[in-house]
Each structure stands twice: as structure tokens, then as C-alpha cells.
Amino acid sequence: MSATPANASPAPHAPAKPVAWLKENLFSSPLNTLLTVLVAWLLVMAVPAMLDWLFFDADFTSDTAQECRKAQGACWAFIAEKHRLILFGVYPYDEQWRPLLATIILVGAMVCSAIRWFWKPWLGLFWAVALAAVAVLMWGGVFGLSHVENDRWGGLPLTLILSTFGIAFAFPLGVLLALGRRSHMPAVKSLCIIYIELIRGVPLISLLFMSSVMLPLFLPEGFTIDKLLRAQIAIIMFAAAYIAETVRGGLQAIPKGQYEGADSLGLSYWQQMRLIILPQALKVVIPPLVGIFISLFKDTSLVVIIGIFDLTQAAKAAIADAAWRGFSVEAYVFIAVIYFIFCFAISRYSQGLERRLDTGYRR
């Protein structure tokens, strides 16, 4: 019996020449041509002026605001003068090496957690040690460190603490809420639905106000909860509700055969979720989960409304200095760059993680 020759694969496309690529992507129609010309004109008008303001005409070295105001561009000397206040808030000046070291530890723990080699059972212990070290550095009171109340914390370390603890506690809570919403037990399902819909139906600002103003009214006399802890709880509750709905979408995307296959193996409910269903569901929803994490990191700036000295509030305090008044743009550009660096790093890592875990279904 003679073998049937396989169909020949089509020849690979030759790379498009620059002129052909421009015609296909930028000038393929009158409308695209008009849009291309308009965007090019905007770039020609905006980019040189922006570069002049940011770098070429900027002042990096002046010692006073009067000298800095003579520059035609940005006054980065203001950032050089106030960077410690912006980054660390009103933490005692001579002790600011402590929040700096705490920030390095937190960022280092995040970086290690992003490396696959560290995905081992002892990673949880590593995080526990890192967070304990951060708490010791920030609070002090031991090992010869002076005690610093958390109402003097501020700036970047506080933003990282709120976002790190928010993600760390909101994620498992959100997964449990998603499983509870799909539960066959009416009481559990109803409670999870009420919680998710109630929290998602109000803005984070209202939860922060409730935690700061209303919650103390319902506590027993003589019992208080720290303002920072109340804000942290509000952030966790808010993020968990959104994570729950995202994870629920991932659970619904898993084919029914996966559940049936898990049942046929005789696995218990929690074994099915832990070993088969949840790993696939979480892989499906990596992009929206990362979006929630990025939003949570940025939304920590809302704690400014209840008097917590986060990165945004620290920038406002720097601007309020009468000797350096009038450089608010530089201050907000500086903190915007900080937010962008962290958010962009999270986004790029999630894209790499998606590619490494790209073993999904092909429909």
C-alpha cells in the first residue's frame, strides 16, 4: 500500500518592506492617512516641548526656589530637596533608614516571589520573616530601635504595606467567596452573594469613611482599632469582592468534563478545587486579576481622605512648604513615575507569566 504524501505547508511570508508596511498599517485608507498625519503632527508639537520642560530647560541644582523659578523648565531641585519627605512622610528624619530598608525588603520579597525557583513551600515562611522584619523596622521598640507610632508612617513604605497586605489577604478571601457563591448550600451562597454585591455596589471611598468614622461608634466602650488597620481592612474587603467575581468567571470557564473527571477519580471537593479546578481557573483569569492588583496599588492613594500619610499626602505636604511653593507639577510627576514603575513591572510580569502558563484549551 503506497503512502499518501502529506499536504505541503505554505511557504512562509517574506518580511514586509518598510514602504509596504507603512502603506498597510498607516496609510491603508483616507481615514487612516488622516489619523496618521494628525498623530504625527501632535507628536511633533508635543514631544520637543515636553523634552525641553523635563530635561533640557530644567533646573537640577538650585538651592532656593527663587533661583529655580528662573528656569524655563521643571524644577527638579525641588524633588532633590523634598524627596525624603515625599518618600517617607513625617517619619523621624534621623530614622528614615528604617523605612528605606523596609521598602527594600518588601520589594525584594516581591521580586523573589516572581521568580519561579522560589515557588516552594518555604516561600510562605520567607514572606512571614520579611513582614516581621518590616514590622520591627517600622514600629521599632526592640533591638535598640526607638518606637515610632504608625500615625507617623507615610510615603512609599506605607503605600507598599497597604497594597501588599491588601493583596495578600484579599486574594484568598476572594477565592473563598467565589467558591461560596457557587456552593450548593443556600445559606453559604446567599451570604457570599450579599457580601459581594454589597461591597461592589459602593465606592472604596465610602468604605474608608465607614471604617474611619462609623466603625468606632459600634465598638464596645474602651475598645479601639487603629486607624491604619481600619483602612487596611476596608481595602481588603473591597478588593476581595472584585477578586471573587473574577475568580468565579474563571471557574465558569472550566469545561464540565474537568469536574466530571475529578469526580471519577474519587477526589473530595477541596482536593478537586486545589489540584484540578482552581489551578486552571486562576490561569484563565490572570489578566483581570493583575488589573485588580494594579488598581488596588493605585487606590491606596484614597486613604489620604481619612488623614493617612500615603505617597500622595506626602507629596501634598512637600508642596505646602512656603519656601518651595508652586512646584506641584514636579511633585505629582515624581509620584506618577513611581506608580508607573510598579504598575508597569506588575503588568510586564503578568504577560510573561501568561506565556509560560500558555497550556490552555484551543477551541
Image: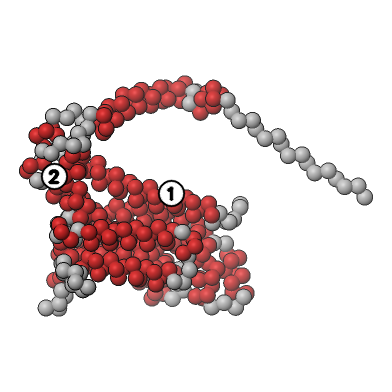
Observer-nearest residue: 144 or 51? 144
Q: Secondary structure at mark 2?
A: helix
Q: Residue at x 53, y 62 (%)?
A: 280
Spatial CA distance of label 2 from label 1 is: 32 Å
Q: Residue at x 22, y 43 (%)?
A: 332
Looking at numbered disc 2 in the image, what kind of residue is underneath it? Ile
Q: Position of residue 91 (x, y in %)?
A: 16, 59
Q: Is residue 264 above or below residue 9?
A: below
Q: Earlier in the sequence, mark 2 or mark 1?
A: 2
Q: Is residue 104 left or right of residue 329?
A: right
User: Residue pushed farthest left?
Assistant: 322
Residue 133 in the figure: left or right of residue 223: right
- Depicted 362 relative to depicted 248: above or below: above
Location of residue 150 in the rendering, given as x and y in whole percent from the top left corner: 18, 65
Rendering quarter of residue 111: bottom left
Per the image, the residue denoted by label 1 is 348
Q: Nearer the viewer, residue 16 or 292?
A: 16
